[in-house]
Image (cartoon, helix red, strand yellow):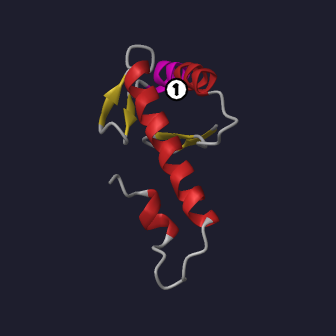
């Protein structure tokens, strides 16, 4: 997990690796968000869910978003394992943000 602090906001990022324990990561994010909120008064905004969240209360919804991201990444990695002509393959960043 990586936490970046700025003048008016903080950013918490984490990987979608298979080896990651998503439940432990959710607890760590909740703990970090509580400390940041207590010190700054800021609220936690989840850009995947497009809303302000309470990590504890919204854990199930956040977990679904995490699972979606992990499954999407798994699909991209699987696509890379299959040889495809370079001209036919979309850019990795276009595939990463494709929700379809």
Q: Which secondary structure type mostly characterizes the magenta part of the structure?
A: helix
Near-viewer residue (20 or 86): 86
Q: Read off the magenta span.
A: 33-40
Q: In which quarter of the image is residue 41?
A: top left
Near-viewer residue (45 or 80): 80
Q: At 42% from the left edge and 66% from the top edge, which residue is drawn? A: 94
| View extreme (right): residue | 19
Q: At 58% from the left edge and 57% from the top edge, which residue is drawn? A: 78
Q: Which element type, helix, strand or loop, lies under badge 1?
A: helix
Residue 39, percent from left and from top: 51, 22
Q: At 51% from the left edge and 19% from the top edge, which residue is drawn? A: 34
State yes or no: residue 78 in magenta. Answer: no
- When the figure is inspected, residue 25 is found, relative to residue 87, above or below; the finding is above
Q: Quadrant of residue 5?
A: top right
Judge left or right: residue 23 versus residue 59.
right
Residue at which label 1 appears: 36
Which quadrant is the C terminus positioned in? Answer: bottom left
Residue 71, percent from left and from top: 50, 43
| View extreme (bottom): residue | 87
Residue 60, percent from left and from top: 41, 20
Near-viewer residue (10 or 56): 56
| View extreme (left): residue | 51
| View extreme (top): residue | 57
């Amino acid at each position: 997990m990586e936490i970046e602090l700025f003048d008016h906001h903080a950013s918490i990022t984490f990987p979608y690796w298979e080896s990651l324990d998503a439940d432990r990561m959710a607890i760590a994010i909740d703990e970090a968000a509580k400390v940041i909120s207590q010190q700054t008064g800021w609220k936690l905004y989840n850009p995947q869910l497009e809303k302000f969240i309470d990590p504890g209360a919204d854990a199930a919804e956040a977990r679904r978003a995490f699972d979606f991201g992990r499954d999407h990444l798994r699909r991209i990695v699987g696509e890379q394992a299959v040889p495809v002509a370079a001209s036919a393959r979309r850019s990795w960043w276009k595939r990463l943000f494709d929700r379809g």
